[in-house]
Image (cartoon, rainbow, N blue to C red):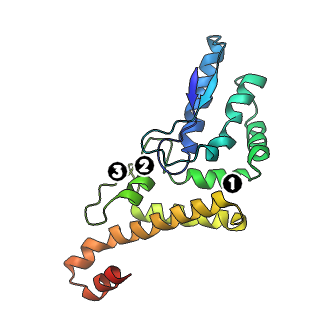
C-alpha cells in the first residue's frame, strides 16, 4: 500500500485529507493483511509543497504499523511533534490552508489566480470571508513560532490569501459602484 501524505495539493500539506484517508486506508490494509505499507509524498501538480512540511504526518504510518490500525491518535501526534519540534496546533494551522478533507485548493487558486478573473473553486458553504477568518486564525496560531522558517513561510502564504480574498470579494462591487478612490488605492498598492 503506497499511501499518500498529501503534499501535492498546494503550498502546504493537506493535513485534513491525509488524516481522513490514510487512517481508513491503513485499517483496510490491516484487515486484508497487506504486508508492505509506505508513505508517499509527491511533488507533482506544481511541486509547491516542501515535502519536509509533511514529515509530522509520517507517524500516521509508523504508529499504524507498530501498534496496529487502531493506534492511539495522541501517540502519532506526539511522534510528529518530536520529529518536527513544532506543536500539533501548528500542523493543524497549516492544514487550514484547505477548508476540509475534500481535494479543493482555494489557497493555491488564490495565490496563482488573477483577481480580475477569479476562478477559485470553493467548497459548498465556503466563502472568501471564511478563508480570511481561517487564515487569520492560522497566523495567530503560528505567531509564537516565527523563529522557524517554515512558520514564517506559512504565515506569508496565509497573508497573500487574505489579501487576495479581500480584493476578489470587493473588486467587482467597488467597480460597479464607481469607487475610484478604492480602485486607485488598489492599483497603487
Residue in the image at 40% along x and 71% along y? 166
Label 1 element class: helix
Q: Which residue is mark 3?
A: 121
Reply above or below: 133 against 6.
below
**x and y, in percent, of residue 169 in the image:** 34, 68
Judge left or right: residue 84 versus residue 113: right
Question: Image point 47% across, 48% down: which residue?
Answer: 10
What kind of element bears circle 2? loop
Distance between the alpha carbons at the discs numbered 1 and 2: 21 Å
Q: Earlier in the sequence, mark 3 or mark 1?
A: 1
Residue 45, position in %: x, y?
A: 42, 41
Q: Residue furthest top?
A: 33
Question: Which residue appears at 43% of the width and 70% of the height?
Answer: 163
Q: Which of the two discs, 2 and 3, labels the residue nearer the N terminus?
A: 2
Q: CB under 8 Å between callouts 2 and 3?
A: yes
* Contact check, label 3 and label 1, Cβ < 8 Å: no
Residue tagged 2 = 105
- Few, some or many residues within 10 Å of mark 3 (<14, 14–19, 20+): few
Measure how far apart labels 3 and 1 are at the Cα level: 26 Å
Whichever of callouts 1 and 2 sits on the residue coming sooner in the sequence is 1
Amino acid at each position: 500500500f503506497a499511501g499518500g501524505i498529501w503534499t501535492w495539493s498546494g503550498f502546504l500539506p493537506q493535513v485534513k485529507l491525509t488524516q481522513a484517508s490514510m487512517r481508513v486506508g491503513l485499517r483496510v490494509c490491516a484487515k486484508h493483511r497487506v504486508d508492505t505499507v509506505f508513505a508517499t509524498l509527491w511533488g507533482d501538480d506544481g511541486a509547491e509543497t516542501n515535502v519536509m512540511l509533511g514529515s509530522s504526518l509520517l507517524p500516521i504510518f509508523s504508529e499504524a504499523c507498530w501498534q496496529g490500525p487502531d493506534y492511539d491518535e495522541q501517540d502519532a501526534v506526539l511522534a510528529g511533534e518530536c520529529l518536527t519540534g513544532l506543536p500539533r496546533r501548528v500542523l493543524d494551522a497549516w492544514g487550514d490552508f484547505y477548508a476540509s478533507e475534500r481535494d479543493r485548493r482555494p489557497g493555491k487558486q488564490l495565490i496563482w489566480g488573477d483577481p480580475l478573473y477569479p476562478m477559485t473553486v470553493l467548497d459548498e458553504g465556503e466563502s472568501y470571508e471564511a478563508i480570511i477568518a481561517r487564515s487569520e486564525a492560522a497566523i495567530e496560531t503560528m505567531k509564537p513560532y516565527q523563529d522557524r522558517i517554515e512558520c514564517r513561510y506559512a504565515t506569508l502564504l496565509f497573508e497573500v490569501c487574505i489579501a487576495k480574498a479581500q480584493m476578489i470579494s470587493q473588486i467587482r462591487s467597488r467597480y460597479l459602484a464607481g469607487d475610484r478612490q478604492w480602485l486607485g488605492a488598489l492599483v497603487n498598492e
